[in-house]
């Protein structure tokens, strides 16, 4: 049910019963990602200007991401966190009691470790370069 999401804020999606569990979960994930970025920035001691310089993006783009404007790619989240001295680790918590927690085994301490077997590697081509360029 992605109809009606255009122009809605994350808060509106959480408050509107017409949206299903997938949309509400995505909205909560957006809020968590933005809060994580804001906490990392405060902890890092960097200014938005210095973060923008480290990421080679505009201060406006950093401000936009830190406010939660728009959708954030996982790669963007990981790059921002790394520029602030953190590594991104993903864990999925069960939405139902019958599901186990997953993802903890993927947490790594070293930036030099290789991805697990089965991780999709996406080759940059002319067809997807525009999609991947946003992560800078």
Image (cartoon, rainbow, N blue to C red):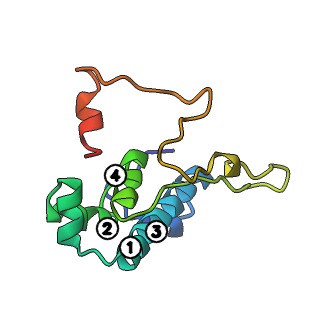
Left or right placement of residue 129 versus residue 33 in this view: left
Which residue is under mark 3?
36
Q: Is mark 1 on a helix, strand or loop?
A: helix
Q: Which of marks 3 and 2 is nearer the N terminus?
A: 3
Q: Quadrant of residue 133?
A: top left
Instruction: Please tell me whether residue 17 is drawn above or below residue 125 in the rendered image.
Output: below
Left or right placement of residue 111 versus residue 95 in this view: left
> Mark 2 or mark 4, which is nearer to you?
2
Instruction: Please tell me whether residue 51 is drawn above or below residue 95 in the rendered image.
Output: below
Q: Is mark 4 on a helix, strand or loop?
A: loop
> Mark 4 or mark 3, which is nearer to you?
3
Residue 110's disc number: none
Question: Is residue 5 at least partly visible in the picture?
Answer: no
The percent coordinates of residue 85 (x first, y second) are: 40, 64
Q: Quadrant of residue 50?
A: bottom left
The percent coordinates of residue 9 (x first, y second) are: 37, 64
Badge 4 local density, few (<14 within 10 Å), some, or many (20+)?
Answer: few
The percent coordinates of residue 17 (x first, y second) are: 57, 63
Which residue is under mark 2?
66
Q: Is mark 3 on a helix, strand or loop?
A: helix
Is disc 3 in contact with disc 2, using a CB cutoff of under 8 Å?
A: no
Which residue is under mark 4?
6
Q: Which of marks 2 and 4 is nearer the N terminus?
A: 4
Mark 4–mark 3 Cα distance, whole angstroms, equals 24 Å
Q: Which of marks 4 and 1 is nearer the N terminus?
A: 4
Is disc 3 in contact with disc 1, using a CB cutoff of under 8 Å?
A: yes
Which residue corresponds to the image point at 41% horizontal and 52% vertical from the top-left? Answer: 78
Which residue corresponds to the image point at 35% horizontal and 73% vertical from the top-left? Answer: 41
């Amino acid at each position: 049910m992605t109809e009606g999401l255009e122009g809605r804020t994350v808060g509106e999606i959480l408050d509107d019963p017409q949206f299903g569990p997938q949309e509400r979960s995505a909205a909560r994930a957006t809020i968590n990602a933005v809060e994580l970025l804001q906490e990392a920035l405060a902890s890092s001691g960097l200014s938005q200007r210095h973060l923008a310089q480290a990421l080679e993006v505009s201060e406006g783009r950093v401000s936009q991401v830190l406010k939660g404007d728009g959708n954030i790619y996982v790669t963007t989240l990981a790059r921002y966190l790394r520029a602030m001295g953190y590594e991104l680790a993903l864990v999925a918590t069960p939405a139902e009691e019958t599901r186990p927690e997953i993802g903890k085994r993927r947490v790594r301490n070293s930036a030099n470790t290789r991805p697990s077997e089965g991780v999709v590697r996406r080759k940059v081509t002319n067809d997807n370069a525009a999609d991947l360029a946003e992560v800078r």
